[in-house]
Image: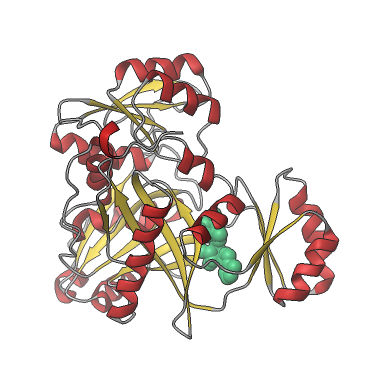
Amino acid sequence: MSKTVGSEAKTILPGATVGILGGGQLGRMMANAGSAMGYRFVALDPTPDAPCGQVARQIVAAYDDREAAKELARRADVITYEFENVDAGVAAMLMEQSYVPQGSELLYTTQHRLREKRAIEAAGVRVAPYAEVRSADELREAVGRFGLPCVLKTATGGYDGKGQWVIRSESEIGEAFETLNRAGTELVVEQFIRFSKELSVIAARSTTGEIRTFPAAENIHVDNILHLSIVPARIDEALQREAERLAARIAEGLGAVGLIAVELFLTEGGELFVNELAPRPHNSGHYTMEACRTSQFEQHVRAICGLPLGDTALLTPVVMVNVLGEHVEPVLARIAKPDEAAERLGAAPKLHLYGKHEAKHKRKMGHVNVLADSVEQALEWISETNIWRV
Ligand SMILES: Nc1ncnc2c1ncn2[C@@H]1O[C@H](COP(=O)(O)OP(=O)(O)O)[C@@H](O)[C@H]1O
Ligand SMILES: [Mg+2]
């Protein structure tokens, strides 16, 4: 387990090749940002013509294909990943054969909700009260302590609200336990936080130990999928700074290298609790692409390559809205026409599509960063399009 900080750190200059485990949209946007600086990219992904494969070279193979991973190691000067469920064996092999400045420790920690919560607490930051539960009786006991509602979650494999059960009455306890227990992983139950807002902060820590954080985003989910990120978050500045401070403390405490996204709950009383982490670029950081002096993707490349980190200052208010499968057609129809609403509101909607072949319902196909003089004007543009009726 290496945390490549300080003396072990290498400076990887533009012209070198970055290998990415995973070829989805995060890899694509990383490759676009890094290519602009002169880096080359090669992605390993099983889907031919994957989003990243359209803008970089691609090795088409399964993620746990050792031979393909070896080829990635041969072709790349530095290796990173764009998702957290990297196979532990592949990670170990790559670390032996190649330069993986992020190491595997942070992946190991964030792949498992219980390990992650313990590590956050060890860094001195609060998470929602939680307990590991091994039986329906233990769950009943924890629910007794936390009160209802509670959220039961699988420790591994969950995303976009999958692998979760919000328990609202005692009568659901048995069924909730039985259902999630079938996933065959540990279970964790959390107190339900009656948050006034969900926030996130993305921190970057480079191989040299330098840390910078991006402005906090206010996130709105619909059906457990991120819908909007609003920046600046509509909270007072002291809280914005506090959220950034917590993220920096987590990046330092967990020995992160590269990006780490910190999802937070803000309560009515002004308390912040960490919900979960992601050791990679994050959907709620896409707003940085046009709205910050440095995007999260450029920052990630800088961090793993040992370059000084970029300035994260916000250039303009922005609202990021996700384009899911069902939004693609109306969005395309919209951008093909003169945009009267944008002119009137002084908004500049920036479209990003990921090049996915099938626009399935609820699938993340792209996003729009709506730049404006205020987040209210950006929200007004989104509402006037009538595309994202919720
Ligand atoms: N303890 C909790 N209290 C209140 N809401 C929660 C809690 N845990 C999760 N949620 C809600 O469910 C969403 C998804 O949960 P999260 O743990 O972030 O899983 P995922 O991996 O699916 O993103 C959160 O963004 C939040 O809206
Ligand atoms: Mg989440």
The residue nearer to you, when weighing 338 against 93, is 93
Please tell me which residue is depicted at 68% across the width and 70% down the height of the picture. Answer: 150
Please tell me which residue is depicted at 58% across the width and 74% down the height of the picture. Answer: 193
In the rendered view, tell whether residue 64 sits above or below residue 335.
above
Please tell me which residue is depicted at 72% across the width and 45% down the height of the picture. Answer: 183
Q: Indicate which quadrant contains ligand 1.
A: bottom right
User: Which colouring convention does the figure follow?
Assistant: secondary structure
Residue ranking furthest to the bottom:
269
The residue nearer to you, when weighing 356 against 18, is 18
Give percent across and percent down for residue 110.
51, 47
Q: Quadrant of residue 308?
A: top left
The reply, left or right, for residue 124 in relation to residue 159 is left
Q: Quadrant of residue 34?
A: top left
Residue 210 appears in the rendering: yes
Residue ranking furthest to the front:
7
Give percent across and percent down for residue 22.
42, 33
The residue nearer to you, when weighing 301 against 238, is 238
Residue 84 appears in the rendering: no
Please tell me which residue is depicted at 29% across the width and 76% down the height of the picture. Answer: 380
Q: How many marks?
A: 0
Q: Quadrant of residue 349?
A: bottom left
Give percent across and percent down for residue 389.
44, 70
